[in-house]
Amino acid sequence: EIVFSYLEHQVPAPCEYIALLALRRAPEWIRRCQDIVARNLAILQTWLAGQDGLSMVTPEGGTVALLQLPPGVDARALSTRLREQFHTLTVPGDFFGAPGFLRISLGTVEETIHQGLKQVSQALHQLRRP
């Protein structure tokens, strides 16, 4: 019965028409999204090369990278600090069964990636201080 209720749902005709128009441009939008992610991945890799103790699980087709944090750095504490002190949103890997990792979105504008990575560096520095 639940499946039937999902299948029975009807979308207004104007919405269906707008969706059809959008789908006609899908290849163009897919290329744009892939270009954004590729540029931001390059920015992340360059930043990562200058960071001690960090590594990355490179996405193989998605828009999210997982940063492996240095031993002793708690991903939840780092994510909380980033949110509260720097107004930067990340997701601790704990939520995805990957403790010790920080989830970083690559699907944003370049300035946001640059600023966010700068803030990750600052927050890591603060957490590492004795």
Image (cartoon, grey):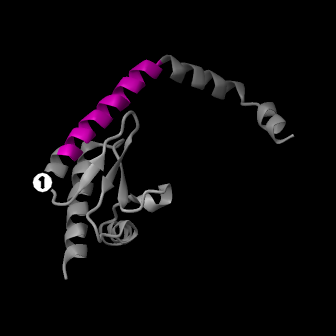
Task: Say which residue appears at 24% left-offset and 36% top-offset.
Answer: 39
Provide the secondary structure element on which disc 1 rests. loop
- For label 1, the crowd category at 10 Å Cα-Cα, with few meaning under 14, some 14 to 19 and many 20 or more, is few
| Viewport quadrant of the N terminus | top right
Q: Which residue in the rendered view is the most extreme toward the right?
A: 1
* 46 w.r.t. 33: above or below: below
Identify which residue, 54 or 42, lies in the foreground.
54
Q: Which residues are magenta?
A: 25-45
Say which quarter of the image contains residue 73: bottom left
Whether residue 112 is visible to the viewer of this picture, yes or no, is no
Task: Say which residue appears at 38% left-offset and 58% top-offset.
Answer: 90
Amino acid of disc 1: Gly
Where residue 5 sits in the image (x, y, percent)?
82, 38
Whether residue 98 is visible to the viewer of this picture, yes or no, is yes
* 83 w.r.t. 64: above or below: below
Q: Which residue in the rendered view is the most extreme toward the top?
A: 24
Where residue 83 sits in the image (x, y, percent)?
37, 67
| Viewport quadrant of the C terminus | bottom left
Where residue 120 sits in the image (x, y, percent)?
25, 61
Identify which residue, 71 or 66, lies in the foreground.
71
Q: Is residue 25 left or right of residue 120?
A: right
Q: Residue 42 magenta-drawn? A: yes
Q: Which residue in the rendered view is the most extreme toward the front?
A: 71
Where residue 109 sits in the image (x, y, percent)?
30, 43
Q: Is residue 101 left or right of residue 3?
A: left
Identify which residue, 11 or 35, lies in the foreground.
35
Q: Which residue in the rendered view is the most extreme toward the left?
A: 50
Identify which residue, 111 or 14, lies in the foreground.
111
Task: Say which residue appears at 47% left-offset and 21% top-offset.
Answer: 26
**Which residue does the numbered mark 1 point to in the structure image?**
50
